[in-house]
Amino acid sequence: MPVLEPNPQNGQKKMLLVFGTFFAIFIVIGVIATILAP
């Protein structure tokens, strides 16, 4: 099963969207934690 297909189906697109959103939230939390760190 390829990680990225040239024309992903609807299910795979939804998975990529979920992972992308989770990754973005993780980065935002990391940046906030770095700024608030003493």
Image: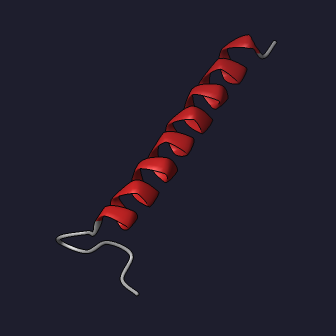
**Relative to 36, residue 6 above or below:** below
Q: Relative to 16, is 33 on the left or the right?
A: right
Residue 8 location, x and y as percent?
26, 69
**Relative to 14, residue 20 above or below:** above
Residue 32 location, x and y as percent?
65, 19
Q: Who's the residue at 49% across and 40% down the image?
A: 21
Of all residues, the one furthest to the front in this rendering is 10
What colouring method underlies this structural image? Answer: secondary structure
**Relative to 8, residue 32 above or below:** above
Q: Relative to 28, is 5 on the left or the right?
A: left
Along the line of sight, the residue nearer the viewer: 35 or 16:
16
Q: Who's the residue at 74% across and 12% down the image?
A: 36
Q: Which quadrant: the N terminus?
A: bottom left
Residue 3 location, x and y as percent?
39, 75
Of all residues, the one furthest to the left in this rendering is 6
Along the line of sight, the residue nearer the viewer: 10 or 28:
10
Q: Who's the residue at 72% across and 22% down the image?
A: 33
Along the line of sight, the residue nearer the viewer: 6 or 35:
6
Residue 5 location, x and y as percent?
25, 74
Q: Which quadrant: the C terminus?
A: top right
**Relative to 18, residue 24 above or below:** above
Question: Where on the picture, by quarter, is residue 27?
Answer: top right
Of all residues, the one furthest to the right in this rendering is 38
Q: Relative to 12, is 33 on the left or the right?
A: right
